[in-house]
Image (spheres, rainbow, N blue to C red):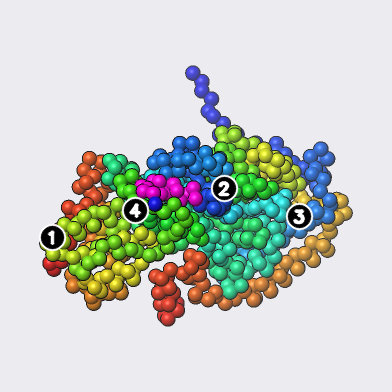
Amino acid sequence: MAQQNMVQAINDALAGEMRRDDRVVVLGEDVGKVGGVFRVTAGLYDEFGEKRVIDTPLAEGGIIGTAIGMALYGLRPVPEIQFSDFIYPAFDQIVSEAAKMRWRSGGEYACPIVIRTPVGGGIRGGLYHSQSPESLFIHTPGLKVVCPSNPYDAKGLLLASIRDDDPVVFLEPKRVYRAVKMDVPAGDYEVPLGQAKVVREGEGVTVVAWGAMVYEALSAAEQVAEAGIDCEVIDLRTLWPLDVDTIAQSVEKTGRLVVVHEAPKTCGFGAEIVQSVSEKAFLHFEAPPARVTGWDTPFPYTLENEYLPLAHRIVPALRETAAY
Amino acid sequence: MDIQPIDSGSAEAVSDLLKVLASDGTADPSKDPRLPTERVAGLLEQMITTRVVGERLSALAEQGRIGLFPHTSGLEAAIVGATAVLRENDWLFPAYGDAGAALVRGASVADIAARALGGANDPLKGRDVPAVFSSRALRIASIGAGPANRLPHAVGLAWAAAQRGDDVVSAAFFDAPEVDAADFHTGLNFAGVMRAPVLFVCRVREGELGAADHAVAYGLASARCDGSDVLAVVRTLSDALERAASGGGATVIDLVVGGPDDAIARARKHLVRLGAWDEARESALVKRVEEQLASAIASGGGEPSLRTIFDDVYAELPPELERQKAAAMRGPRA
């Protein structure tokens, strides 16, 4: 089995699916000849040509809008938005059109598009190349939202997303793109949408994270393990639909919950996770559920490691929650 | 220095536009699309049906029995003529209130009424306002409320069809105020870059600036005609469709309405002159349409089942929506 980073694994998934299904097309800014700003689509233009890999004008609303039209005709478009910070010009097309297509047409029209977009901070990208807008899409009925943390999951989740009949916002943690290598099967496999994964078992505190913050949660868990705090870390993988059962089962065991995310705290997905778990497992809580998140500020360039909820900020939250 | 102000009213006057039918109903033989007379009579029937349906449903809206149903009065030649040119495999992205376009594509008066009533017979399950109509069988796309949002969809669909090797053109209907919206320009830009076979059909009322002047910036063809002249509309759209279908790309078309002659009156005069229309035929048509409307309105009652709110949000209901659906079904009801 070959070792791949996340960029290679996603490229592998796209190429494999484009060979298997000629309805799959890729479109976006510089995704063709250049191979994308992060080279995720490198080589696809040479293999599949301009009718499958489309360099578009620099207009995100047009990228998603044309992808919606392609999907109406039966294609399976995989548009790329260069950075999730640039997705806002396409927000109306995603929220008002793609998300509502099936429902508003009485079930006659589906909109199976997968919007791939790099997400999150930690690459010195400043406030316009670092954001985590997942809550905006989770809040929108009709969308699915996925965020893999590693190359294996990225490939399997992307294949599952392309084969899904609903629109998927596929968030790729850019900090992980080339930072992690692991064995990734060359062949076809899916990681099912809507299933979280327990990536570290423990009895003391449940820690929920996704994307690049999974590694920070694991690092923090190791640090507090020396002090006898035994953390269970859950990688959500799919943010919506939320696998609340996996979290609630863990909380029934640990009685304690800490959610970690890069996005700002207020109305962040952490709040929804805490409340959803409360509705299922309130009587099991032995401590107030806690959140470790980005601050409610724009994302800073120089002080990005002070903004991000890295292990040094997760550790105190784990200690406080365990000691409550 | 004497600087002349820019003439912002550069759109041509209606009298300068391509016109086939004169006020007295005579057709200019050099521009006449030469449709069979009975085909023109069919267009007039659909125009009259569109007006009767629109007036009746607008009245229903004014009585508060249904939501807003905008008047398309005066646009009948533009809507019916432009839709009639499309072939069966072509796709229509209508504007709000284009019930007439749905009629031409094959929807019945009862279908339009059922949709407008939003009741148990509504194919869209009471989910959208009365003037929105979509149908996969009729290749009428589902549209949202955002101005010009559907223009990029029309481009993507037409591009996809061409990519599959299919002879398909898409037509996006819109009204002149939508020219201000970002997605109008995005749609034209992508159509030019992607060489997509699209007809951008703009209805321009008096005093409005149209869309056609923007075509040149995006490398697209443009055309203008008298939008109250159904034969001029057919002629203009036919030329544009031929260009799109033969690889010539998209055309941006202004259908300028609001001249001195009503669209229906002019077509009627033309057909009366040809001996192909009379009062008896028209009153029988109006009576038939009114009966169909009355029957549909009488039988359109009842709300869709509560559970339909939760259907079609996703292909499969996620667990959280299952819980919410169960809660809603337990009540209390409104």
Residue A184 in percent (x, y) is at: 39, 52
Q: How many marks?
A: 4
Vertically, is A82 above or below B73?
above
Tell me which chain the residue with mark 4 is part of.
A
Name the residue carrying label 3.
B43
Predominant SS of the magenta segment: helix
Q: CA distance from mark 2 to mark 4?
A: 33 Å
| Few, some or many residues within 10 Å of mark 4 (<14, 14–19, 20+) | many
Q: Is residue A286 visible?
A: yes
Q: Nearer the viewer, residue A104 or A293?
A: A293
Q: Which residues are magenta?
A: A2-16
Query: Quadrant of residue B104 in the image?
Result: bottom right
Q: Nearer the viewer, mark 1 or mark 2?
A: 1
Q: Which mark is residue A226?
A: 1
**Left or right: A205 as drawn, with respect to B258:** left
Name the residue carrying label 2.
B156
Mark nearer the N terminus (1 vs 4) = 4
Q: Judge if badges 2 and 4 mark residues of a common chain.
A: no
Residue type, numbered disc 3: Leu
Q: What residue is shown at x 53% (from left), y 76% (from top)?
A: B305
Secondary structure state at the residue bearing disc 4: loop
Q: Nearer the viewer, residue B164 or A12?
A: A12
Residue type, numbered disc 2: Gly
Query: Quadrant of residue B276 in the image?
Result: bottom right
| Few, some or many residues within 10 Å of mark 1 (<14, 14–19, 20+) | few
Q: Are marks 4 and 3 in contact (CB under 8 Å)?
A: no
Q: CA distance from mark 1 to mark 2?
A: 57 Å
Name the residue carrying label 4.
A150
| Residue B334 is covered by the magenta coloring | no
